[in-house]
Every structure is written in C-alpha cells, then in structure tokens.
C-alpha cells in the first residue's frame, strides 16, 4: 500500500512540472513576438521620417543639405517612470515649501512673544521704580516726623529739668538780664565745649571732623561687600570720634525720562565718645586768668568765633553764668541742649548752631 502511494505522488509531481514548463515556453514565445513587433514599428517610423526629410530637402534646393540626427523613440515605461519621478520631486518641493512657511510663521510668533515679554518687563520695571520713588518719599516723611518728635522730646526734657531745678531752690533767685541780639545761624568759626555736671570741657570737634573728611575716602573699599562700615579717629583731647559710612541707592530720572538708580557712599553719622576721667573746669574756674578755658580764648577772635556749648539738663544754671561771662568778653554763645546720657553726635542732615 505504501509503494502505490509513492508512485501516485511521483506521477502527480511530473504532471505539474510539465505544465510549468509549457507555461514558461509560451511566455518566452510571447516575449519574442513583442520584441519583433517593436523592432518593425521602430523601423517604419525611421523610414517615414527619412522620407519627410528627403521631401523637404527637394522643396528647398537653395538650402545646404543637412543630415538630421536619427529620431529616437523613448520607451513608454521609462517615460512613465521619469514622469513619476518628476511628480514626486514636485510633491517633495511643495512639502518643503509648506514646512518652510510653517517654520517662518512659528519664528514670527516667537519674535512677537519675545517683544511682548520685553515690553511687559519694561513696564513692570518702570512701575517698580515709581514704587521705589514713592517709598523714598514716605521714608523721608517718616524721618521728618521722627526728627520733630525728637525735638519735642528734648524740649519736654529741658522743661522738666528747669522745673526740677526751680522746685529744689528754696530761696527765690534773682536773674540778671543780659542784653543779647536775636539768634542768628552760625556760619563763622565755631568752637565746641561740653557742659556737664557743672563742668566745662573742650571738644575737639573741628579737628576730628577735618580728619574725618581726609580719611573717609580711603575707607570706601570696605563697602564693596558690606552695606556700611564703622571707623574711629583719635583719641584726642579726651575724645574719640566714631563714624559710620553707608552705601545708599538713590533713584533719579535719566535724560530720556526713564527711572534709574545709582549707588553713592554717604556719611551716616558720627559720635564723640569721651575717654578717661577728663571732666573739665567749673564755671568759677574757667574765668580765672590761669584757666585752660581763658588760655584757649586768648587765641581766638571774638569777631569771627562762636562758642557752642553742648548743655546737659543738669547744667542749665551754669550755662547762664557762662553765657553772661562770655558776653562781657565779647563772644557770642550758641546753646546745644542734649538729653541725659546722650553723646555729642552729628550727621549730614543736622542743623547749624544759632548764636546769641
């Protein structure tokens, strides 16, 4: 049974191979027939073209005979392929053009967004500068109110001290009237003294502030990494000057009208710190011929020198005596009342003395 099956399969395989061989033969014959027909058609076209050229040459005998190149008929399959390639190139060019237009539009949108962001940033910056200017004005108004409050406080302290001294005195005191001119602001030479606990002490304020003007520019480098710095000068005549330099931001308007900020270094304030046990001379001692005070007065002219006295609340009575004695000597006197336990100090925003 197995052998018969193998024989049947072999016969079926041979028949299939015969059929395939016949089909291949038929295809070969068809290809040869088509090739022969294509050659005949090409030959006929060339003959017809040659006849037309000969006819034209006979009709125009004056023209020089020219030999035309043979006409080559392209293959239709190659033409279709070339046409397909051209159409594909055109489609690719259209796609590239569309993509380029899209990228150009995106770049335009990005540029517009960037310009809008820059405009918004400039607007916000200008608003901040305006707000900074407003804060500076508010800070100035606050400083003025604080200064007024301090002056009122000093006035109240002085009144309380005067009232206290009045209550302590059991016997009525006869006050001597001293004819003095109206107070005027000091713009001449001004020498400073401190009157505390009834004792007068010379304060080398002029010498030390002059040294401050010379040394302060040399300390500006310390403000490169800090907002402020504190330095000292002295000691001299029993005092040490302690001053503070500060780096400030000042808003201003440019020529184009824009708001800007510049940084400047300014003197914040200075303080005269007393050292040691130097207390000075009493009012009775200062008018003696051998006193240190009289020795200093001898080197100054009463016409261009003002004696400024920083008076503490416990020495108002002594100040009146000192002022009377200086008036008899021809010197004008300026009073600088100062609260208890407060040091002699100054700043660029301070006021000048008023002498009488």
Image: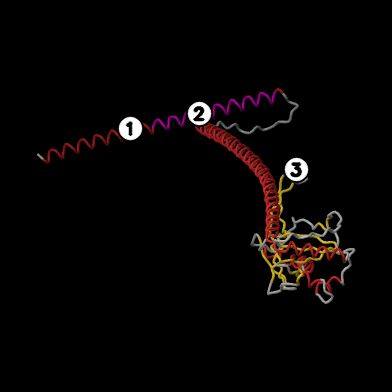
Query: Helix, strand, or loop for circle 3?
Result: loop
Question: Which stretch did the figure color magenta?
Answer: 29-58
Left or right placement of residue 83 versus residue 330 in this view: left
Q: Residue furthest left?
A: 1
Residue 32 among those drawn in magenta: yes
Q: Is label 1 or label 3 in front? A: 3
How far is disc 1 from disc 2 in space, using C-alphas? 26 Å
Distance from disc 1 to disc 3, alpha carbons, whole Å, reads 97 Å
Q: Can residue 329 be found in the magenta stretch?
A: no
Whichever of labels 1 and 2 marks the residue nearer the N terminus, that label is: 1
Q: Quick one: label 1, few (<14), some, or many (20+) residues within 10 Å?
A: few
- Please give the label number shown on residue 23: 1
In the picture, measured across the screen, residue 121 lies left or right of residue 329, that is: left
Q: In front: mark 2 or mark 3? A: 3
Name the residue: 72% across, 56% down: 264
- Outermost residue on the front side: it is 171
Of the pair 349 and 260, the residue shown nearer to us: 349
Q: Main secondary structure of the magenta part?
A: helix
Q: Nearer the viewer, residue 268 or 180?
A: 180
Pointer 1 or 3: first along the chain: 1
Mark 2–mark 3 Cα distance, whole angstroms, equals: 93 Å
Which residue bears the numbered disc 2?
Answer: 40
**Residue 64, picture quadrant:** top right
Residue displayed at 78% across by 65% down: 192
User: Where is residue 23 shown, x and y percent of the image?
Assistant: 33, 32
Q: Quadrant of the C terminus?
A: bottom right
Colour treatment of the image: secondary structure
Q: Which mark is residue 167?
A: none
Residue 121 in percent (x, y) is at: 63, 42
| Secondary-structure class at tag 1 | helix
Which mark is drawn over residue 257?
Answer: 3
């Amino acid at each position: 049974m197995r052998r018969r099956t193998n024989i049947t399969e072999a016969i079926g395989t041979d028949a299939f191979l015969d059929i395939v061989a016949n089909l291949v033969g038929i295809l070969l014959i068809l290809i040869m027939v088509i090739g022969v027909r294509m050659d005949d058609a090409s030959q006929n076209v060339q003959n017809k073209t040659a006849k037309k050229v000969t006819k034209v040459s006979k009709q125009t005998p004056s023209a020089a005979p020219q030999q035309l190149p043979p006409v080559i008929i392209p293959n239709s399959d190659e033409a279709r392929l070339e046409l397909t390639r051209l159409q594909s190139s055109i489609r690719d060019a259209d796609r590239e053009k569309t993509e380029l237009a899209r990228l150009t539009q995106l770049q335009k949108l990005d540029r517009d967004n960037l310009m809008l962001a820059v405009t918004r940033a400039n607007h916000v910056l200008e608003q901040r500068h305006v707000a900074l200017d407003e804060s500076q004005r508010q800070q100035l108004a606050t400083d003025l109110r604080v200064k007024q409050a301090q002056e009122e406080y000093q006035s109240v302290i002085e009144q309380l001290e005067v009232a206290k001294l009045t209550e302590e005195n059991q016997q009525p005191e006869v006050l001597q009237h001293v004819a003095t001119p109206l107070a005027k602001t000091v713009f001449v030479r001004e020498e400073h003294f401190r009157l505390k606990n009834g004792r007068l002490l010379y304060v080398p304020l002029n010498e030390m502030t002059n040294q401050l003007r010379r040394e302060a520019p040399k300390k500006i480098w310390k403000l490169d990494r800090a907002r402020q710095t504190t330095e000292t000068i002295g000691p001299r005549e029993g005092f040490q000057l302690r001053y503070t330099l500060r780096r400030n931001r000042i808003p201003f308007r440019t020529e184009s009208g824009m708001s800007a900020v510049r940084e400047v270094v300014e003197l914040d304030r200075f303080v005269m710190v007393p050292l040691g046990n130097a207390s000075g001379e009493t009012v009775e001692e200062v008018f003696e011929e051998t006193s240190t005070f009289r020795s200093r007065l001898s080197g100054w002219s009463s016409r261009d020198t003002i004696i400024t006295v920083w008076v503490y609340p416990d020495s108002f009575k002594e100040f009146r005596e000192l002022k009377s004695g200086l008036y008899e000597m021809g010197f004008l006197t300026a009073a600088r009342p100062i609260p208890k336990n407060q040091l002699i100090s100054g700043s660029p925003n301070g006021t000048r003395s008023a002498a009488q």
